[in-house]
Image: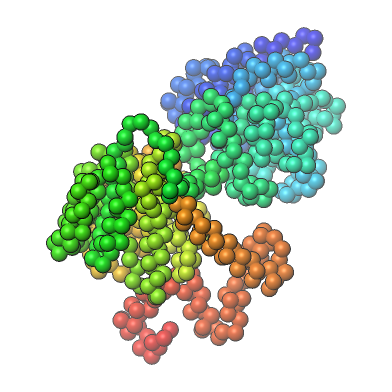
Amino acid sequence: MDNFNENNRLAIFFFYDKDGKVDRYIPNMLEDLCKNISELLVVVNGKLSDEGENEFRKFTPNILVRDNKGFDVWAYKAGMEFYGWYKLNTFDEIILMNFTNFGPVYPFKDMFDYMSERDIDFWGITKHHGHNYDPYNRCKYGYIPEHIQSSFIAVRKNMVDTDDFRGYWNDMPEINGYEDSICYHEAVFTEYFIRKGYKSEVYVNTDDMKDRADYPLMIYPVELIKNRRCPIFKRKSFYNLYEEFLDVSVGEPTFELYRYLKEETDYNLDFIWESILRTANMYDIKQRMQLNYVLPTDIKKPKKVEQPKVALFMHIYFIDMIEYCKKYADNMPLYADIYITTSSEEKRVAIEKAFADFNRRKVKVILIDNRGREYSGLYIAFKQYYDKYDYVCVSHSKKSGYDKPLSIGESFAYHCFENTLASRDFIENVIATFEENPRLGLLVPPTVCHSTYYYIIGREWQFNFVELKQTAKEWGIDVDIADTKPPVAPLGGFYWCRPNALKLIYDRNFKYEDFPEEPCKTMDGTIMHTIERIYPFVAQNAGYYTGWVLSDTYSKLEITNLYKMLRDANETMFWSFGIHDRHTLLSMVASAKNPIDVICSDKTAWEKSKILVRTLLGTKFYEYLKACRNKLNMKKGDKNG
């Protein structure tokens, strides 16, 4: 400790990105780090783009690119082997650090200055308080000990120059997965060396929080940053499994973190957006960041002084829906332009007559081919106008005649209109929300779930995932799209957007022939439903996020309905099977050999099979297949199968 030179530090920085791209938060972090070290080695697992290499060379000539093996553990090991033990011993401190942190919120110098005064052998920024069990069943201690988090560990020379430290790394087993990296390194490093007699500390002491959270940096990031001057926060806070929050909170940690960073610090929020939008799934981002906007219908939020350019793009196919559509169109601001497409001369005349008293605003009615429904109108007829506006609302005369009673479909239309065009104040608030959030590209109503649409929750992709993945590839969309995660999409075709976010679609130069002929029995598997679900990924690819939007009046219905549906499911499962928590319930359902037996225990095998097929395919598609079978007379003797 007496000979410790705080400027004689080596930092081994581990980096991984599937495309080898170096987002701006990395140079920002390294620039501050390099003020506190004498030498930097960057170890890259996998790819490194030319641009990324140029970024790293601003800080160091030492860049080691290796195969993507062994996670961060073997990257650190490779970095130390790159120097060799003799060279490593010339440094007074070695820092093992990786790319999984954002920051610094405060200069790293504050931390280094404080820790340089501590009489210790190794240290870190934060700790995990461990578990009294081993969820991975491979930790040598039989439980997860309290440990310094491995995204930043600093080791002093007196510990580096020991057989203990060299042996730890020389004997490091192969790391073949996340569980290995936890159980063979992160969770055991601290405990191993403490048992050997070495002393450690963390810069951000959270011992008083053990009973509140085992992972304080994830669950209480604002507390650590605001009151304990933690300089970093976790990148995965913005996209990791939501269960990590929901199991121990109502989901506020990242929501509150982002708000604190925005209101109380000068950290560049674009660093966050650039990284997560490029690499994470939009659904995960939406969950973690609570990207739900409940906007007032009778109170107007202040906007910027400059008046934005706003338009409504509306397709009206059903004549009996003209007045209904007009009622909502009339909520558009007086400075907004209104464009309406329709499919026949008769409808065009009727629409122009109905909207004749809209002389306060520009209303243009456009005749289009009866092909592709609202989508052809949107991307062919409206193509010449979309880039003239700052914000655009898209809607249509939604009518679902195949659901009986008709009130089911009418409520779907109500759901769509009330969450996009509820009132003049609501629309002004939508516009203000876009202005307050420059990364917001798309606002869509929440996924409909009443009546027969209940089945959509959990089956949002329906039969469109394969086609969408192929389309995304053809269009050059390179963001995370997973069939296990729903698209944050306007399932109903209504939304507000920043036109730049959807420029890729408008630039496709669609023709009417690209859309199926009418009558189109089902939209599943067609370009229309592909487009409907690809919106959030197009926006994300352009660097924008998608959120849900609800009017305050509609949210009253939504809360009542969701609670009722959840309570019905819980009551049935809890009383029937004695289950008292969500994870047990999910586990039981997932492991059931034949869940359909629970639903229809008194049915014959043939009746069960029909219910199972209908359940898996969805009622509408099932009925469509039945109609096709009957039409083709594939089974003449059974008309009711």
Residue 463, can we see it?
Answer: no
* Residue toward you, 553 or 463: 553
Residue 136 image offset from top left, x and y in percent = 71, 48
* Residue toward you, 465 or 364: 364
Report the side of 540 relative to 288 (left or right): left
Determine the residue positioned at 22% across, 46% down: 360
Hey, which quadrant is residue 438 in on the image?
top left
Determine the residue positioned at 81% across, 42% down: 141
Residue 516 image offset from top left, x and y in percent = 25, 62
Report the side of 635 relative to 451 (left or right): left
Report the side of 31 relative to 547 (left or right): right
**Exactly how many numbered labels are in the figure?**
0
Hey, which quadrant is residue 108 in on the image?
top right
Identify whether 510 is placed above or below 411.
above
Determine the residue positioned at 66% across, 11% down: 7
Residue 578 image offset from top left, x and y in percent = 72, 69
**Looking at the rendering, in which quadrant would you find the N terminus?**
top right
Identify whether 542 is placed above or below 474.
above
Q: Residue furthest bottom?
A: 637
Residue 593, can we see it?
Answer: yes
**Looking at the rendering, in which quadrant would you find the C terminus?**
bottom left
Residue 630 image offset from top left, x and y in percent = 34, 82
